[in-house]
Amino acid sequence: MATPGRALPQPTPETQHFWDGTKANELLLQRCDDCSKVYFPPRPFCPVCASRKVSVTKASGKGILYSYVIHHRPVPGFTPPYAIAVVELAEGPRMMTNIVECEQTPEALQLDMPVEVVFEPQTDTITLPLFRPAPTAKG
Amino acid sequence: MPHNTVAVVGAAETTKMGVITDLSQIGLHADAALNAMADCGLKPSDIDGIACANETPVQLAHYLGITPTWIDGTAVGGCSFMIHVRHAAAAIEAGLAKTILITHGESGKSRIGNPPRSVHPQSLNGQFEQPFGPMGPPSMFTIPVLRYMKTYGVTEEQIAQVAVVQREWASKNPRATFRNLITTDDVLNSRMIAWPFRLLMCCLVTDGGGALILTSADRAKDFPTKPVYILGTGESAETPMISQMEDFTSSRAFRVAGPTAFKEAGITHKDVDHLMIYDAFAHLPIYGLEDLGFLPKGEAAAFIAGRNTAPGGSLPLNTNGGGLSYMHSGMYGMYALQESVRQMRGIAPAQIPGAKISVCHGVGGMFAASGTVIFSNQAP
């Protein structure tokens, strides 16, 4: 269910594909056709080699919890305490997000724990990519 | 740039520091600028270069009655003033100006004439960070720290020690906002802001300002003040997004700006008598000590907890009490520079006896940019 009140992105021509992707429940990154670098946030050229030949690529949605804080102050759309996190995607790039379906405590939020993307609609046009603890692989 | 050819001849902070309700932001700039001009016996008509960050140099030139031949409005956060010093030294070397005024004023607490900051929803930060609930630096600048702590086995107690040691320095400074000594438990038991950061691990919010006047070293000898020479400077930038730092345990901007300044100054770390590292939060001195090359990675927290940067220690750090205890109006770099100049003049409240070289290192934004200035009181 949409969380009212939080700050929402306004897409630009360079980022529209990303937000179209989250609305369709896909996490889209970009890959350089020349040097193969996978990068984020979106831009129409490679930040490593400056090539304009880049493609949109669908990410696995898998990653690890890389770092975070647990915020204790009130912010519109959030109930403190809540974690503001950075995940490292399996494809390499990192992104800021929130960790859902998980207690917002240091004990529950262990660095390097596997996480997976979930898509949380906010408005008719904006869906945010959030992450939840991933089921641990067994065998 | 050849070093030791430009000097600070005028330096002053605002008349008052802390909560200032009778001046707006531009008034704080002017108060500091007038104090710096009085410090070295100059009038606005003697100034031909001006730099500032949170107001435009056009505003200040007009307000103070200065006709500049050189202006610099570099505004990259709290280290803008270190970078102004670097640019001003190069401009004086190049003959673009003879006498340059760098001013700062900030109504950070009272917020008079200081418009509220906002993050535009179309910006990179607005699209890819702001929707996840950060509210300013306390909830963002702190995000990399858990990764640092896990990588190097650093504890919350050790990070708290940074604030404890700096309060010892502040206790010696009559102008410091907080002067009462504190313990590690005081820090750990203070209000939780953004775990693992408590209130006393975060900088103050105050009003104030400061100004510097630079000229060539050969002219500096004619001023009434003791010249403080600029040995070397550095600057760099990394990213406006804390989530996109290359390495959460180290600042690339620090690793470029710091060594650039050391190389230009032609000094080694053991030559440094006094050190300022911009401490918006308690982890900044830890990152700074390592990224500037004073210590191997992972050793700075134990070094600080071991009292090496405390009064009586081998490497006096943030001797005014820092942003954690002295003052922090939002862009703190100017106040770090003022303390380096006081130490080189020999007039600091907690003076380091015989100090000859001071390193002043600043951060802009949240590990977004960096500037380093190395000062000396030794004539070229």
Image: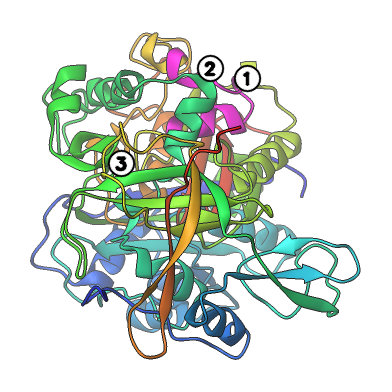
Res B299 label:
2
Chain of the residue under label 3: B
Identify the residue shown where x is 52% and y is 40%. Answer: B361
Q: Assign the N terminus of chain A to one quadrant of the image.
A: bottom left
Disc 1 chain ID: B
Q: What's the amino acid at mark 2? A: Glu
Considering every residue shown, the one lying at the far front of the view is A139
Residue B118 in the image: x percent, y percent?
A: 32, 76
Query: For the residues marked 2 and 1, what is the alpha-carbon distance in whole angstroms?
Result: 6 Å
Q: Residues within 10 Å of mark 1 (few under 14, many from 20)?
A: few
Q: Is mark 2 on a helix, strand or loop?
A: loop
Q: Is residue B5 visible in this depiction of the protein? A: yes
Residue at (27, 76) in percent of width and height: A2
Please indicate whether residue B204 sits to the left or right of residue B276 in the image.
left
- Residue at label 3? B323
Q: Which residue lies furthest to the right in this view?
A: A34
Q: In this view, does B338 lie above or below B130?
A: above
Marks 3/1 in contact by CB < 8 Å: the verdict is no
Q: Which of B141 and B322 is in front in this view?
A: B141
Name which residue type carries label 3. Gly
Q: Mark 2 lies on which chain?
A: B
